[in-house]
Amino acid sequence: SKLVKLKNEDDKEDSMRRMAWFFLSGLVTYPALVILCDIFGLPNALAILGSLAETYFISVSGLISVYFGSNAYVKRHTRTDDN
């Protein structure tokens, strides 16, 4: 039972790491798309991406912070209850 619990915890941490890399790659790719639209002379796409940038970065940052914060909260209170 303890081995299964450790395996599940390890899998959860792996998925959190993959999620963080996925969102980080999105945060890096977004400005690259804006630059590419400017290079290829796509003013409409550039305007659309530029207008969505604030909402995109705030929402992705919020998702990441809420997810990791809630997991840290649950983990802390689970440890306190176990002791």
Image (cartoon, grey):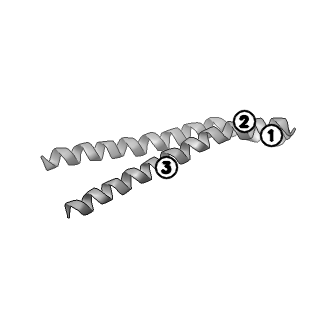
Disc 1/disc 3 C-alpha distance (Å): 27 Å
Q: Amino acid at mark 3?
A: Met
Q: Which residue is mark 2?
A: 50
Which mark is first along the chain, 1 or 2? Answer: 1
Point out the image quarter for the N terminus. bottom left
Say which element carries label 1. helix
Q: Nearer the viewer, residue 55 or 42?
A: 42
Q: Residue 46 appears at what percent x and percent y?
A: 78, 38
Q: Amino acid at mark 1?
A: Cys
- Eye-nearest disc, 3 or 2: 3
**SS under mark 2:** helix
Q: Earlier in the sequence, mark 1 or mark 3?
A: 3
Q: Residue 12's spot in the image, x, y percent?
A: 37, 54
Classify 10 Å Cα crowding around label 1: few (below 14), some (14-19), many (20 and above). some
The span from disc 3 to disc 2 (Cα, nearest Å) is: 25 Å
- Which residue, given by chain and number where applicable, does mark 1 sit on? 37
Against 8, residue 69 (above or below) is: above
The numbered disc on residue 19 is: 3
Look at label 2 and name its amino acid. Gly
Q: Quadrant of residue 36?
A: top right
- Look at 72% across and 36% down and name the residue there: 50
